[in-house]
Image (cartoon, grey):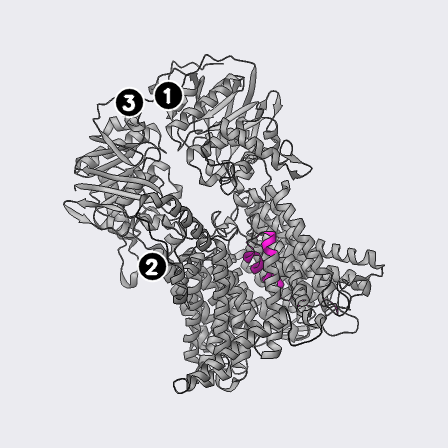
């Protein structure tokens, strides 16, 4: 028994929502129309509140593109209002379907999101140009650590180990990548070191959470502090005095993929990125496939849902959990390399700045599913990049609120306001044999 | 396959759960392991299945000594287990559950689900199980889930099958079907260990009976033995199977329930239009297979269910719509069906547990602070009066035995002024000595003029305590009958069938 | 290190003579109480963490590394360097946290101790906030957000209003605590109403609070000081500043006294009040609490509000006491997270938290001296602090490292 007087949270199901209170059963059908309505009203309100004049240019391709698409220039306010009307129509359609008790199709929220975004951008970037390639491509780049972190989180939690220490894994990954890449003179060993570093944190997490049954949330929180302390300490004592040899790695450069990179719009966004992004694509596909289609994945999910049942059919529960979180840690650590090898060259104090918690948010918002979590991470990356783009063109949209978005969305998600999430049943509960 | 256990000893700390147990099971035989709750049957089977490691003794299969390091080894050796709490993953399909741990795979570890599906269908057909391999386990009825457990064992070519208290969750009809399946398996040459504490089932299917008490084998018995003989072997002394009680002294109608409906979170009607009355000084027992609305009924009375309609009135006061606290204050005593979950705070001392439902006002509370002296004096007195075997009142409730824990709950509820006692499974998982004590207390409460509602899935308990019996099936009343109604009739009613000539008994 | 500890603690052998058994059993149980009790594991956890810290100091010390390169030729150089680096660090810590023997004037010599208490104040208050929530089964990671909101609200009262001190200071404290209570209460309420897990909600609320404060501190019509481009507010008015309790030569302010009061109140609340009884009941077994008429959701909300107000007190402590030059984004000074380690080390008991807060306050005060005089990063304290908590949470691990007998299973 762990003797610390800490909550018996494990017993009540880790991060599982407490079933004490009944959620409103009918909320599911009402949610979409309400959200769409509120969003439409919000768009109309900001346009009423601050009318912009002039034209907005949407630039679809860079000048260097193999196939260049023409720019699209539209009158800002007119486009904004047209899109607001489109949004209103789509919201009305959602209401109609709700009243008629018809299922809401998937295209409806997607179409709404596109129309809303176009409307919002034409208003926000009046008399300016929006470079779609850099807006979306930048979003992909910013989402790299979030996706890696989220995938690591999903894997761990699917095996029943809550990982609050994604932040620590990213930070330690960034640290190890910077040093290794500096020492070897090549970023590639840095990537490998980042994976090892992330797995190392996972190993400590496992030692305490799996072997010694310490509350997983506590270990995660403390590990984050430990990694911050350790990297700060070493940064000041070792890295700063020896910056030339230990903290000046080569950056990973963008490598366009032939043919794919020349596809208009999509090519520059998805296929003219750093190799880390291509690794990311592969990891997303592999993790998803492995989790749902292989023996390994079946066992991982079994261990996270009902470890005792897995044990009774001869699956080594704790070994499976160890293996899974080590892999998860390596994946998260790889995401850390983004900070010190892609974003900038070199390590700096606490340079991950809470990205690990956004990744955690993506895990939950993505309902513990690798694809959904990836999409959530991309969404959060987009919000972050949009904020950067808008403040770069001097828009008066308060950037703080856009940066707040991932966290707010997650609170809404866990409160069941936007899609109820059900974590793996044994998430956060240590497995004891007797 | 022939199983021989020799001198198996298993200790947990200072407790000896299995004390040098020896046992032989022949192929083509159903061997019953009979014993009270806590006698050590499940521990023994967990040792056999490799979940626990025996401190002493050896396991021999077909003459070869086995050294299991885990369930995987036991399964590979041909042992299959149908657990009391099903070892199935609710969000997996039947096929996925059956293949888990024994997966056939294709290229790169890819699952071969078709192969598993075929295997499920094949076994299902051979024994007439009617199981859909693609259904999610959480959507299946309990009886079918149990068949999935059996398929799981058979798909691994188990030659020895262990059934651990398999009938606890089944209707009498499903129980009969299970017995039939067990006979079928026996015919197919499998060796079967059947663990139970229900005497009737033992006598129905067993070829041989081994009785275990306090971790030791106390003897073998023939299936022809009488209930009383088996019971006294199980308990170690002659057992009074009946509770002595006088004719009830009935008062006025006290609890009047009208058209009660309870809807659960998933939107199912768990209690569907119940109307009944309990008079002061009367015990009404609710009989039925677990999961037919009993839990929801008791929780609705206590204000623990969210979606309740209809009326529950106690001495003319309406309880529906009131908070649990108000209902408790109105004089409702509640012995919940699972003391570990709803009855006790394991990390609290006995004394602290005794004030759990009186944390708002006197006698243990004054101006928002605790009256520790008053609580301790009360606890000292109660500990003795209710025969709770503990070092002192500062013992943590979690460190007590099941029987003593239940006595603490009973003491807490009966030591205040009650106008109604609701007792759900009051003796589940409790030793026989405590059962007798608790039954006496319940009868004493009734003789004190309190209306009592007892919910029990054990027919013996129902018959022993009841002045009248109400049988529930799928949230509805099948009938309300006299306490001396034949068991066969009650058993039939528990499957939802109402005998044609049945007349409801009104108190 | 492990092998050194071994001989002294060999388990006593089972005696052969039966007549000696009773006496033997008694002495053995006493021995067990000492060796197997939490106290020993706690001390060893601290020792272990300090040992790791020492390794880090030595490994990053120039002189040690230099002498290590010719260790086979002159091992004494290496040992001397090792000793100097480690003893230098820890004596600097002692000078910074307890007593500075390099000075002559008694008041100046003891000044470090008052610094320790100054740092301990918010750690204790925050630790109580986290610990109290623990007792209700809730993990309050939202200390940072609660401190930021409290600091912003209380700080606004502190610089904006013109009131006599007797009203101004209490008002600023109360407003701050109320803001913390609201921010904490959101997590409690969401948990009660929707089942949203408080760990996730409080983590996310930390960032929401941060960006809200960031927004307010970059808008002149909100908190930003007029004419300033920095995210910082005006300094506190004198009437709202926590007075120094030992005169102006010491930085120790009333915040520490308030923290002591909070300890007393929390102790009474948990151990003597019915609300505390219900909080503990809900924490130990919410199902049984609910079946016994206790409103679990309300208890969650109330306890998170109390927790938030205690972290609010920590935030107020910073804004009105330690850094009175204005509200800033780093006003929490990572106390929100330190408070978690304080609560864990103090095992969620008020008196334990008091002791743990003092220890970590000393580490902080000493850490700064260590950084300035020995050039060892103060971040070492973070490492030692988190290692203490980790080791403390896993006594079996510590026992295994020191090869002590395992505690008997219950």
Tell me how far mark 2 sits from mark 3, CA to CA: 50 Å
Q: Quadrant of residue C241?
A: bottom right
* Magenta span contains residue C332: yes
Question: Which of B450/A88 is in front?
Answer: B450
CB of mark 2 within 8 Å of CB of mark 1? no
Look at the numbered disc 2 and give the secondary structure of its residue: helix
Q: Which residues are magenta?
A: C324-353
Query: With respect to residue A257, does A219 lie above or below?
Result: above
Nearest to the eye among marks 2 and 3: give it. 3
| Residue underneath mark 3 | B227
Q: Earlier in the sequence, mark 1 or mark 3?
A: 3
CB of mark 1 within 8 Å of CB of mark 3? no
Using the image, tell me which numbered label, if any, was put on residue A209.
none
Query: With respect to residue C275, does A405 lie above or below?
Result: below
Q: Position of residue A132 (x, y in %)?
A: 57, 73
| Residue underneath mark 1 | B490
Tell me how far mark 2 sits from mark 1, CA to CA: 49 Å
Q: Position of residue B197 (x, y in %)?
A: 32, 30
Residue at the spot x=55%, y=48% of the render?
C137
Look at the numbered disc 3 and give the secondary structure of its residue: helix
């Amino acid at each position: 028994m762990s003797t610390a007087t800490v909550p018996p949270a494990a017993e009540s199901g880790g991060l599982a929502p407490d079933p004490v209170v009944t959620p409103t059963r009918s909320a599911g059908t009402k949610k979409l129309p309400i959200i769409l309505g509120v969003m439409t009203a919000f768009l109309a309100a900001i346009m009423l509140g601050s009318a912009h004049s002039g034209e907005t240019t949407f630039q679809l391709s860079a000048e260097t593109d193999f196939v260049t698409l023409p720019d699209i220039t539209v009158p800002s306010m007119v486009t904004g209002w047209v899109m607001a009307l489109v949004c209103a129509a789509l919201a009305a359609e959602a209401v109609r379907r709700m009243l008629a008790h018809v299922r809401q199709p998937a295209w409806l929220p997607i179409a709404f999101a596109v129309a809303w975004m176009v409307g919002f951008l034409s208003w926000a970037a009046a008399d300016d140009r929006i470079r779609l390639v850099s807006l979306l491509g930048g979003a992909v780049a910013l989402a790299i650590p979030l996706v890696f972190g989220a995938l690591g989180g999903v894997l761990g939690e699917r095996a029943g180990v809550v990982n609050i220490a994604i932040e620590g894994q990213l930070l330690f990954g960034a640290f190890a990548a910077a040093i290794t890449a500096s020492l070897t003179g090549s970023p590639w060993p840095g990537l490998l070191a980042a994976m090892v570093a992330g797995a190392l944190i996972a190993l400590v997490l496992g030692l305490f959470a799996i072997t010694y049954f310490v509350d997983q949330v506590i270990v995660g929180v403390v590990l984050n502090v430990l990694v911050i302390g350790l990297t700060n300490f070493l940064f000041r004592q070792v890295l700063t005095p020896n910056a030339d040899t230990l903290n000046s790695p080569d950056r990973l450069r963008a490598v366009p993929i032939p043919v794919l990179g020349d596809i208009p719009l999509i090519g520059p966004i998805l296929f003219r990125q750093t190799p880390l992004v291509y690794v990311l694509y592969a990891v997303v596909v592999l993790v998803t496939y492995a989790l749902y289609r292989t023996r390994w994945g079946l066992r991982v999910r079994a261990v996270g849902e009902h470890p005792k049942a897995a044990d009774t059919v001869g699956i080594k529960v704790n070994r499976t959990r160890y293996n899974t979180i080590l892999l998860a840690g390596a994946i998260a650590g790889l995401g850390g390399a983004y900070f010190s090898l892609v974003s900038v060259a070199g390590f700096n104090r606490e340079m991950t700045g809470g990205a690990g918690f956004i990744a955690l948010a993506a895990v939950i918002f993505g309902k513990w599913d690798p694809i959904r979590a990836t999409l959530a991470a991309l969404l959060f990356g987009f919000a972050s990049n949009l904020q950067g783009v808008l403040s770069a063109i001097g828009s008066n949209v308060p950037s703080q609120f856009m940066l707040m978005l991932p966290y707010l969305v997650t609170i809404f998600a866990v409160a069941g306001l936007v899609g109820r999430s059900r974590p793996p049943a044994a998430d956060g509960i240590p497995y004891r044999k007797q | 396959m022939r199983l021989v256990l020799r001198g198996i000893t298993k200790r947990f700390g200072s407790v000896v759960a299995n004390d040098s147990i020896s046992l032989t099971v022949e192929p083509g035989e159903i061997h019953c392991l009979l014993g009270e709750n806590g006698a050590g049957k499940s521990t023994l089977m967990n040792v056999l299945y490799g979940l626990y490691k025996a401190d002493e003794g050896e396991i021999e299969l077909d003459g070869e000594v086995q050294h299991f390091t885990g369930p995987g080894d036991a399964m590979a050796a041909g042992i299959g287990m149908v657990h009391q709490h099903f070892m199935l993953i609710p969000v997996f399909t039947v096929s996925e559950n059956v293949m888990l741990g024994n997966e056939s795979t294709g290229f790169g570890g890819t699952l071969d689900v078709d192969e598993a599906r075929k295997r499920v269908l094949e076994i299902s057909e051979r024994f007439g199980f009617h199981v859909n391999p693609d259904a999610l386990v959480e959507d299946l009825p309990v009886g079918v889930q149990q068949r999935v457990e059996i398929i799981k064992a058979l798909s691994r070519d188990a030659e020895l099958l262990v059934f651990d208290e398999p009938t606890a969750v089944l209707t009498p009809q499903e129980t009969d079907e299970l017995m039939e399946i067990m006979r079928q398996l026996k015919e197919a040459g499998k060796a079967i260990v059947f663990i139970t504490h229900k005497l009737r089932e033992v006598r129905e299917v067993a070829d041989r009976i081994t009785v275990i008490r306090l971790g030791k084998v106390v003897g073998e018995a023939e299936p022809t033995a009488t209930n009383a003989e088996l019971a006294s072997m199980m308990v170690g002394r002659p057992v009074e199977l009946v509770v002595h009680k006088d004719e009830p002294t009935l008062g006025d109608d006290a609890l009047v329930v009208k058209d009660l409906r309870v809807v659960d979170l998933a939107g199912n009607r768990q209690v569907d239009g119940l109307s009944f009355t309990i008079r002061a000084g009367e015990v009404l027992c609710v009989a039925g297979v677990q999961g037919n609305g009993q839990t929801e009924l008791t929780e609705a009375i206590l204000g623990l269910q969210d979606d309740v309609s209809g009326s529950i009135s106690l001495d003319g006061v309406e309880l529906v719509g009131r908070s649990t606290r108000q209902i408790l204050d109105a004089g409702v005593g509640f012995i919940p069906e699972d003391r570990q979950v709803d009855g006790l705070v394991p990390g609290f001392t006995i004394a602290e547990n005794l004030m759990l439902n009186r944390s708002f006002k006197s006698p243990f509370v004054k101006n928002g602070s605790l009256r520790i002296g008053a609580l301790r004096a009360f606890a000292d007195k109660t500990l003795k009066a209710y025969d709770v075997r503990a070092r002192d009142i500062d013992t943590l409730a979690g460190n007590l035995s099941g029987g003593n824990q239940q006595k603490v709950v009973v003491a807490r509820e009966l030591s205040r002024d009650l106008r109604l006692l609701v007792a759900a499974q009051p003796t589940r998982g409790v030793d026989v000595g405590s059962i007798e004590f608790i039954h006496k207390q319940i009868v004493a409460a009734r003789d004190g003029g309190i209306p009592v509602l007892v919910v029990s899935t054990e027919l013996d308990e129902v018959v022993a305590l009841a002045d009248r019996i109400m049988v529930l099936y799928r949230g509805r009343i099948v009938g309300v009958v006299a306490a001396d109604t034949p068991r066969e009739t009650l058993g039939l009613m528990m499957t939802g069938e109402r005998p044609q000539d049945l007349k409801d008994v009104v108190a | 290190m492990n092998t050194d500890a071994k001989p002294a603690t060999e388990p006593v052998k089972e005696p052969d003579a039966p007549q000696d058994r009773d006496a033997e059993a008694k002495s053995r149980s006493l021995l067990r109480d000492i060796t197997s009790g939490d106290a020993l594991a706690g001390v060893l956890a601290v020792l272990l963490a300090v040992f790791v810290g020492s390794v880090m100091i030595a490994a990053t010390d120039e002189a040690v590394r230099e002498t290590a390169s010719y260790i086979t030729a002159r091992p004494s150089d290496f040992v001397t360097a090792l000793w100097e680096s480690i003893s230098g660090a820890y004596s600097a810590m002692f000078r910074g946290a307890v007593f500075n023997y390099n000075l002559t004037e008694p008041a100046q010599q003891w000044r470090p101790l008052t610094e320790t208490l100054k740092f301990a104040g918010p750690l204790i208050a925050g630790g109580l906030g986290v610990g109290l929530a623990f007792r209700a089964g809730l993990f309050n990671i939202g200390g940072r957000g609660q401190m930021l909101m409290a600091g912003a609200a209380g700080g606004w009262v502190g610089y904006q209003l013109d009131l006599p001190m007797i009203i101004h200071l209490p008002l600023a404290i109360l407003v701050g605590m109320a803001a913390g209570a609201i921010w904490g209460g959101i997590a409690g309420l969401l948990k009660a109403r929707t089942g949203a897990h408080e760990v996730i909600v409080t983590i996310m609320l930390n960032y929401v609070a941060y960006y809200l404060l960031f927004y307010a501190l970059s808008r002149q019509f909100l908190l930003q000081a007029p004419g300033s481009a920095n995210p910082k507010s005006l300094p506190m008015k004198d009437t709202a500043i926590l007075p120094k309790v030992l005169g102006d030569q010491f930085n120790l302010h009333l915040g520490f006294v308030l923290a002591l009061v909070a300890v007393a109140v929390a102790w009474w609340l948990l151990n003597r009040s019915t609300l505390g009884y219900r909080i503990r009941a809900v924490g130990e077994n919410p199902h049984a609490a609910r079946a016994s008429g206790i409103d679990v959701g309300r208890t969650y909300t109330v306890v998170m509000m109390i927790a938030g107000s205690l972290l609010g007190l920590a935030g107020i402590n910073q804004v009105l006491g330690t850094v009175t030059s204005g509200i800033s984004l780093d006003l929490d000074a990572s106390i929100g997270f330190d408070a978690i380690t304080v609560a864990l080390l103090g095992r969620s008991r008020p008196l334990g938290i008091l002791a743990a807060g003092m220890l970590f306050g000393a580490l902080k005060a000493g850490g700064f001296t260590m950084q300035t005089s020995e050039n060892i990063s103060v971040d070492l304290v973070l490492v030692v602090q988190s290692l203490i908590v980790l080791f403390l949470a896993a006594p079996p691990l510590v026992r295994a490292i020191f090869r002590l007998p395992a505690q008997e299973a219950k």
